[in-house]
């Protein structure tokens, strides 16, 4: 069963950085001022792989904010103080 996964970032440029690290070919778009990537995950493991890729991009590029929405859940990453922390 396919699950819709939406990844959002503060800008299209930041979403493009995330898209480069995803394990599938993905394209970033600008939508209402946010960078957005929409994907379909074929399994829970693939969803987890997408979340892990966002986490890695967040840390590597010192992004300010990113959110992964899937099913009725979401995972938010946001910069706090001098370091980064996933919420």
Image (spheres, rainbow, N blue to C red):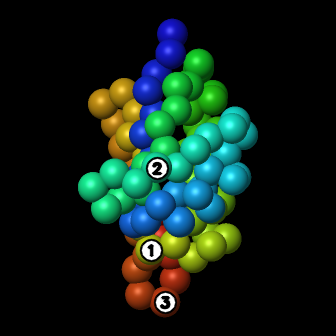
The residue lying at 47 percent from left, 37 percent from top is 38
The quarter of the picture where the C terminus appears is bottom left
Label at residue 27: none
The residue lying at 59 percent from left, 19 percent from top is 42
Q: Decide which of tag 2 and tag 3 comes sooner along the chain.
A: 2
- Whether residues under marks 1 and 3 lie with C-beta atoms below 8 angstroms apart, the answer is no
Q: Residue furthest left?
A: 32
| 59 lies left or right of 28 | right
**SS at badge 1:** loop
Q: Which residue is mark 1?
A: 64
| 70 lies left or right of 47 | left
In terms of depth relative to the viewer, which is nearer, 56 or 30? 30
The residue lying at 62 percent from left, 41 percent from top is 26
Circle 3 packing at 10 Å, graded few (<14), some (14-19), many (20+), is few
Label at residue 29: 2
Q: Which residue is mark 3?
A: 82
* Callout in the foreground (1, 3): 1
Q: CA distance from mark 2 to mark 3?
A: 29 Å
The residue lying at 69 percent from left, 36 percent from top is 24
| 74 lies left or right of 86 | left
**SS at badge 2:** strand
- Whether residues under marks 2 and 3 lie with C-beta atoms below 8 angstroms apart, the answer is no
Q: Specify the quadrant of the image occupied by residue 59.
A: bottom right
Q: Specify the quadrant of the image occupied by residue 62.
A: bottom right
């Amino acid at each position: 069963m396919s699950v819709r996964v939406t990844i959002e970032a503060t800008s299209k440029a930041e979403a493009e950085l995330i898209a480069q690290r995803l394990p599938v070919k993905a394209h970033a778009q600008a939508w209402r001022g946010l960078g957005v990537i929409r994907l379909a995950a074929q399994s829970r493991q693939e969803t987890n792989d997408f979340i892990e890729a966002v986490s890695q991009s967040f840390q590597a590029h010192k992004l300010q904010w990113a959110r992964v929405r899937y099913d009725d859940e979401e995972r938010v990453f946001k910069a706090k103080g001098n370091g980064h922390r996933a919420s």
